[in-house]
Image: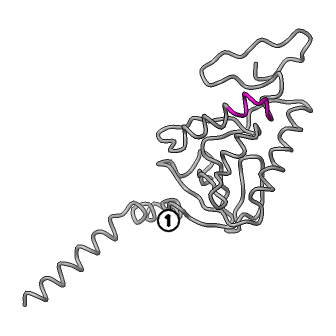
Amino acid sequence: MKKNVFGNLLILILALLLFSTPAAAQKEKGTSTADFVSGMEAEVKEVIDGCTIRLKSGETVSYRGVRIPEGSGSVWEDLRKKGKAANNKLVKGKKVRLEFDEVRRDEQQNLFAYVYVGDILVNGEILASGYAVMSFAPPALKNRDVLIMLELSAREGSRGFWSTEFAPPAPGMPRAPARPGAPESPTR
């Protein structure tokens, strides 16, 4: 009798644990269980831009902690094309690992992840190349310090967007005035 009670109690505890997980709760709300998997692996089907990809599953992934700055003109378009090409070289057709913070989807309901190819943090590579800028998005940003250092490296090395007079200011800092005769940036 004691064995039977113990077995039933164990089954009850396991059932409670299984059905009380965040993934199970969110599944009822219609959110994919992939949202709650850290270290999810997937294959990249398409590169959309310097910090967005589409997986073979059809899911779109926005890179966590980085964004492409706004601006117009041939210099900006050229840098965006180079950023997409760099991202393409890093991830297209490759298996990637996605890691998440507390926020697993962005405003457009895309997966919002750190993307790795092997040990390479792709978000960081794009940032260090200057083809994206840091984007602070609370509540958590587990790779924040690394991304800040990589952006500073790109800024100090005048790489990518940091090589133009339209370089975005550091967060919280005023934009430097345009040099005389320079075309006005739409983000000034």
Question: Which residue is label 1 attached to?
Answer: 33
Asked where in the image residue 152 lies, by quadrant, the reply is: top right
Work out which quarter of the rendered image holds the C terminus and state it. top right
Magenta-highlighted residues: 153-160
- Tell me, yes or no, whether the highlighted magenta stretch contains residue 156: yes
Instruction: Reply yes or no: does residue 183 show up in magenta.
Output: no
* Residue occupying the far top of the picture: 180
Instruction: Count how many numbered circles sit on residues in the image.
Output: 1
SS state under label 1 = helix
Amino acid on which disc 1 is placed: Thr
**Is the residue 116 above or below the residue 5 in the image?**
above
Indicate left or right for 96 with 2 as reference. Answer: right
The residue drawn where x is 69% and y is 22% is 169
Extreme residue toward the left, this view = 1
Q: Residue 98, image x and y in percent? A: 59, 58
Residue 66 x %, y %: 65, 40
